[in-house]
Image: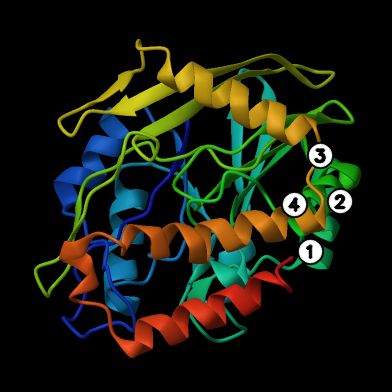
């Protein structure tokens, strides 16, 4: 069984969404996900409705036609929060998905409104307790965390621990685009970010291109056996997107990144440490990048104001 985070939609009615980039896929790329061996996909992410309701309809219809279970988004709240239920070798497994409000998700599901399942901790813990009475394992897949951060926030750690305390067998995180650490809490693995699996260059409508660096092209496949008594034989396998294919990383870079992030998490993440990391990633690192003479000529007053605002936000980041 392979878990997938499907961050794509099919073209909808052509109207624009609030943010860029829009992540759009063809039916052939969705079929490729199935052909690659993925057996369940999480739709709770910040690009699930980039082509609005019509695009989501087409995506869901195709997933149903090819028999690929999905969870984490729907045409109303009940659909969005509903688990995907699988029976694998006699073991009943439930999958729950949700996205944090700060992940950039534009549309959250409501009673009569299509969208993504919101990371609502009280609801998730109730669902987990209920599902544990009916299944062998509950796996929670969350779209959360700040982009390019190598550390989860103290709040994320508290949330993940609460989910395990409620009965989750495993918590899988994504959205930061880089690897974050893995910890074992009360016998359950929590990986705060799996990193990028597919890392194609992102092209904007104004002609600008976002090119992923080596760190962002490195991801992790988490191998685990779901036994009767819990999760066993856990392994982290580094992957690398070459720009042409996704390969197992043989250079040692991915293994080193996994070890570094695991050690950083094991040392603990304090609020002051996280806020320093926030200041570095959000303010200081971008500011240093603009010191190159080719970029200085594009510097405007709004850039300075944004940098000051981000620095102030770092003081209260959690």
Residue 34 visible in the shown view: yes
Q: CA distance from mark 2 to mark 1?
A: 8 Å
Judging by the rendered image, the residue that carries numbered circle 4 is 273
Q: Is residue 242 left or right of residue 172?
A: left
Between discs 4 and 2, the one toward the N terminus: 2
Above/below status of 303 relative to 57: below
Q: Which mark is residue 162?
A: 2
Q: CA distance from mark 3 to mark 2?
A: 17 Å
**Label 2 secondary element:** helix
Query: Residue 19: x and y, percent?
Result: 33, 78
Q: Which residue is rendered at x = 30% and y = 49% of the image? A: 65
Q: Which mark is residue 121?
A: 1
Q: Nearer the viewer, mark 4 or mark 2?
A: 4
Q: CA distance from mark 4 to mark 3?
A: 9 Å
CB under 8 Å between callouts 2 and 1? yes
Query: Residue 156: x and y, percent?
Result: 73, 54
Q: Which residue is rendered at x = 75% and y = 52% of the image? A: 273
**Label 1 secondary element:** helix
Nearer to me, 243 or 274: 274
């Amino acid at each position: 069984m392979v878990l997938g985070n499907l961050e794509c939609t099919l073209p909808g009615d052509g109207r624009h969404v609030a943010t860029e980039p829009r992540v759009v896929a063809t039916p052939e790329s969705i079929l490729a996900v199935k052909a690659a061996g993925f057996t369940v996909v999480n739709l709770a992410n910040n690009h699930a409705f980039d082509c609005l309701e019509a695009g989501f309809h087409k995506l869901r219809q195709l997933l149903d036609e090819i028999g690929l279970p999905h969870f984490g988004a729907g045409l109303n709240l009940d659909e969005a929060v509903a688990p995907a239920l699988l029976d694998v070798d006699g073991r009943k497994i439930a999958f729950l998905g949700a996205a944090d409000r700060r992940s950039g998700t534009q549309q959250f599901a409501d009673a009569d409104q299509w969208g993504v399942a919101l990371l609502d901790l009280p609801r998730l813990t109730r669902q987990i307790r209920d599902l544990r009475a009916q299944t062998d394992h509950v796996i929670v897949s969350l779209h959360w965390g700040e982009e390019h951060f190598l550390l989860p926030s103290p709040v994320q750690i508290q949330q993940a621990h609460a989910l395990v305390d409620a009965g989750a067998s495993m918590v899988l995180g994504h959205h930061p685009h880089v690897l974050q650490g893995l910890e074992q809490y009360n016998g359950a693995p929590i990986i705060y970010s799996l990193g990028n699996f597919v890392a194609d260059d992102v092209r904007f409508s104004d002609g600008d291109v976002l090119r992923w660096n080596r760190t962002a092209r490195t991801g992790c496949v988490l191998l685990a056996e779901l036994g009767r008594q819990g999760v066993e034989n856990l392994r982290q396998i580094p992957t690398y997107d070459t720009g042409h294919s996704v390969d197992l990383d043989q250079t040692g870079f991915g293994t080193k990144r996994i070890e570094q992030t695991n050690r950083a998490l094991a040392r603990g993440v304090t609020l002051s440490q996280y806020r320093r990391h926030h200041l570095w990633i959000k303010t200081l690192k971008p500011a240093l990048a603009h010191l190159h003479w080719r970029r200085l000529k594009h510097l405007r007053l709004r850039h300075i104001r944004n940098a000051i605002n981000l620095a102030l936000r770092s003081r209260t980041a959690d």
